Amino acid sequence: MAMPRNSAGENGFCFTQTLDFSCPSPCPSEVGQTFDALSGQEACRTLLSNGTASSGVPSPSDSCAHPLCSTTPGEEETQFSEGIKYVSAEGEELACGWGAFTPGCLQLFNTSKGVLFFLCVASFLQGMTVNGFINTVITSIERRFDLRSYQSGLIASSYDIAACVCLTFVSYFGGNGHKPRWLGWGVLVMGLGSLLFALPHFTTGRYEARSAAEVGICGGNQSLPCAQAASSLSSYRFVFMLGQFLHGMGATPLYTLGVTYLDENVKTNYSPVYIAVFYTAAILGPAAGYLVGGMFLNIYTEIGRETDMAPENTLWVGAWWIGFLGAGAASLLISIPILGYPQRLPGSQRYIVMRVSEAHQLKDGSHKKASDPDFGKTVKDLPRSVLLLLKNPTFIFLCLAGATEATLIAGMSTFGPKFLESQFSLSASEAATFFGYLVVPAGGGGTFLGGFLVNKFKLRCSGIIKLCLLCTVSSLLAIFIFFIHCPNMPMAGVTQMYGGSALPGGQLNLTAACNTECGCLQETYSPVCGSDDIMYYSPCHAGCKEVSEKLRNGKKVYHECSCIEKTLLPGSGDAEAGKCNSSCAKRPLLLFFMFMVILFTFLSSIPALTATLRCVSDRQRSFALGIQWIVVRTLGGIPGPIAFGSMIDKSCLLWQEQCGEQGSCYVYQNSAMSRYTLIAGLVYKVLGTTFFTVACLLYKPPPAESAPGSSDTSENGNGDLQEHKPSLPAEEDS
């Protein structure tokens, strides 16, 4: 990163202590004496005019070609390519490396862009694993380990539970400690969690699914002993929860300390862009997880073993575990360079002294306590630090607004693929890929665009909150699209009677005159699509007596199905394996408005985060993010998947039955699923709108004269400083 030069066009510094610009010979002695005599305020006025010394006082750059230097012995110096030496105030090591191993080639990455790159890779892996792979494989894990939706929701929530447990400790002590080390160890723990999550695949026996070819046709061997059917695999959910717990522990520093580390090492008006890039990588991660995870689900979970099932078969379980192995190994590797970064980057001190506080002003003035350099370094200051945040109403309502948004994001990201799978009659891999196509442009684009808008229009804290409010209202209007839904594909005995009439009282009736002699079992669920465009529970329930050795469109074909009406058309009376294709005319409209909901929801994420960083004092930023994440996860991230899972369970039409025990859901009622999604969306979006409105109304910015010498939008386009510049003494004389 380029260092400051004493040339026109650069912002000056305002120091609160005496500046020492004394230089060794051959510098003229009077220059050193002049600057030694200046107080902090006089030096500030002297250097204020865009980095150019006033005509009344000699400038070091006018008198001396040597770089600025310090006479204090023992202070660390860092040489930059421009020939300017930057002196570390505390004398800490600013080189990139591990211990004494700090080779020169590594210093090329010892910049804000280098940190941004490695943090983006880490956030990409975290998003791909936690919000991509896990949400993609939820259906497969439910099927493989006999889990219900609320149990899989609990697995998803374990991530947020771990984050809540660790956030206070990590954000408070990590915020005042060596942030890159906390970040590096966190990414390493996250990698271990991914490897643990894949472990059940290797510790369980082979997946044995009784295919329709074995027991499915009418008159076949329908015996299915309960000793085989009953399963204790659901206890593996605790291994998944532990893996998610490690994911949560490892990712805790990433979105608290990682954000503040970036914010501290770049210019104030560039900070939203850096954070937006960081979060865009975190959004693209889930999108990649959906796409790559969907590809893996097309591979049979028992690699190298042949099966006569197709991915469209509801008994199919894809290779859900491959992604976790790759992401775990990559996380272990990326943690190594992050651990090598210094506590702060060379040259970052100039951004700290130039920063202007926009912290909310408390009536009793207690917010000034956080400006004490010694504040927050011991455990004794923890209660006072919490109290200062609780007395900040803008911060509190931004946290509550974030919690409402997090509930919808967590719920929709976990069960969004399942929603598409049910509405459009897709396979699990197709639904995951579809959802990935929605999240890539909407989530990633919205996240980056939010940071770009804050930077483009140089928005202050109040303007940022108003932008969040506008985005929330827009997504609130778009969520009304869930009034509409795609109708369920007709399924004999589940959504309608075998003759086409409605089911009395909505009760299942899978037995009809056409299949009574087949002896079909409800445990064998393998849906087929008849030539009459009606789905049947299995080939046996459709009365099919033969299975063709030839495939049609890559699917098995069953013949002589007594329950399917025969016509003069070729292929009538036959059935194909898998679900019937949905021809829902509302699909484009539903997908478009889902895209808009995701876009505007993520569009407010970076502005809301930026507003949180600005409405608190500088020394409380890491801790404030930690407290915010606790509120967001406790009220949003944890209950979100559990609540959505419970609601989706209520819309289930057909449950898996294994010897009297209820398993996962096979078929959902689309109208009920849309209705519950609409209710949840409206409740949380209205609450979010209310909280952003209150935060905007209660925000009290600092008075303009509180930071003399700073301009929010200076003449050269920099938005670091406030507008009221005191006139220079030399200018007044002239």
Image (tube, rainbow, N blue to C red):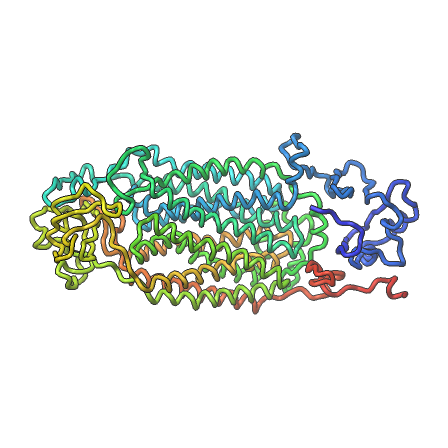
Task: Name the residue located 50 percent from the left edge and 44 percent from the top edge.
Answer: 251
**Quadrant, the C terminus:** bottom right
Task: Name the residue located 58 percent from the left edge and 58 percent from the top edge.
Answer: 452
Quarter where residue 611 is shown: bottom right
Q: With 647 as the anchor, is 158 left or right in this view?
A: right
The residue closer to the viewer here, 500 or 574, is: 574
The residue closer to the viewer here, 312 or 702, is: 312
- Position of residue 627 relative to residue 203, above or below, is below
Residue 410: x %, y % from top left: 42, 54
The residue closer to the viewer here, 671 or 213, is: 213
Q: Residue furthest top?
A: 100
Q: With 306 as the anchor, is 589 left or right in this view?
A: right
Residue 332: x %, y % from top left: 50, 36
Residue 199: x %, y % from top left: 38, 35
Quarter where residue 494 is shown: bottom left
- Position of residue 281 relative to residue 449, above or below, is above
Task: Name the residue located 47 percent from the left edge and 57 percent from the top edge.
Answer: 442
The residue closer to the viewer here, 295 or 557, is: 557
Quarter where residue 111 is shown: top right
Is residue 494 visible in the rendered image? The answer is no
Q: With 407 as the anchor, is 47 left or right in this view?
A: right
Task: Name the residue located 75 percent from the left edge and 39 percent from the top edge.
Answer: 79
